[in-house]
Image: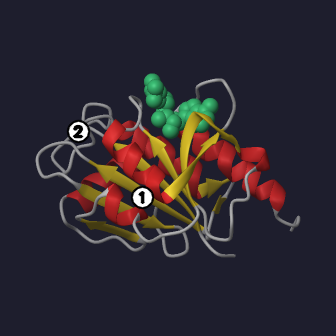
Amino acid sequence: MPPREFVLYSRSGRTDGRFTDLHGAGRLDVVFQCALMSLYRSYALRQDVIFHALLNGPPDPPKEVVVDGSRLTDAPPDERSWNALLRHVLSGRPHPGIEVRRNSLQSLVRGRGDVFVLERGGEDIRTVELGDRPMFVIGDQVGLPKRDEEFALRHGTKVSLGGREYLAAQCACIINYVLDLREPRS
Ligand SMILES: C[S@@+](CC[C@H](N)C(=O)[O-])C[C@H]1O[C@@H](n2cnc3c(N)ncnc32)[C@H](O)[C@@H]1O
């Protein structure tokens, strides 16, 4: 299966490993929740998912944490494990399937097709042609900054999950479900 990609834009996510709780680290709990809903099923990792968290908090923004579901190992789907994992990689230490690099939303979406920006006022996801390698851009607990949203929209399309506002992680979960329903049952 070609990968489906999720991009969480975190305005405040901390960009080093010096923290104790995820919430206090610029809401890295939202990053954990989105990683969970993007990458895992029950007792299974989604091999066809790449999850990107763009972190824009102190002390060294911007940073991107990229998690490749086809290569990820030793990552149980619980908050305590992900707290340790995020501290580990944000301290510059390696982990299979996770990379930390300097990157921006602009360079992630530039030159790429099938970019979909999640917004309540967008086109209904149920009727949008999502292509083979969709990339979904999701705002954090505050939403996408206007400037970044405008840039992403020059390269993509607004899609909506309906009139109710969902948590960022719920958006990833719903999108996975919609895409799963479009695939032949295994
Ligand atoms: C918790 S919401 C952000 C709420 C924030 N108050 C705002 O106005 O953007 C997090 C993100 O989830 C996505 N989102 C939430 N509900 C949605 C919906 N019904 N359709 C599409 N995207 C949605 C958007 O990308 C949003 O930025």
Mark 2 Cα shell of 10 Å, populated few (<14), some (14-19), many (≥20): few
Q: Quadrant of the N terminus?
A: bottom right
Residue in the foreground of this view, choosing between 123 and 18 = 123
Q: Percent from the top left, x then y, of residue 169? A: 54, 40
Question: Does the closest atom of ligand 1 sit within 8 Å of the Cβ of label 2?
Answer: no
Looking at the rendered structure, the secondary structure element under dot 2 is: loop
Q: How many marks?
A: 2
Looking at the rendered structure, the secondary structure element under dot 1 is: strand
Residue drawn at point x = 55 percent, y = 42 percent: 118
Residue drawn at point x = 74 percent, y = 49 percent: 177
Above or below residue 183? Residue 160 is: above
Residue drawn at point x = 79 percent, y = 48 percent: 127
Name the side, left or right, on which 8 lies relative to 70. Answer: left
Q: Percent from the top left, x then y, of residue 104? A: 29, 58
Q: Percent from the top left, x then y, of residue 30? A: 42, 38
Decide which of tag 2 and tag 1 comes sooner along the chain. 2
Which amino acid type is marked by label 1?
His
Q: Quadrant of residue 149?
A: top left
Name the side, left or right, on which 172 lies relative to 105. Answer: right
Q: Circle 2 is placed at which residue position?
A: 20
Residue in the foreground of this view, choosing between 185 and 147 = 147
Q: Quadrant of residue 70?
A: bottom right
Q: Which label lies toward us, 2 or 1?
A: 1
Name the side, left or right, on which 185 lies relative to 89. Answer: right
Report if residue 78 is visible in the image: no
Q: Circle 1 is placed at which residue position?
A: 52
Mark 1 Cα shell of 10 Å, populated few (<14), some (14-19), many (≥20): many
Report if residue 67 is visible in the image: yes
Which amino acid type is marked by label 2?
Thr
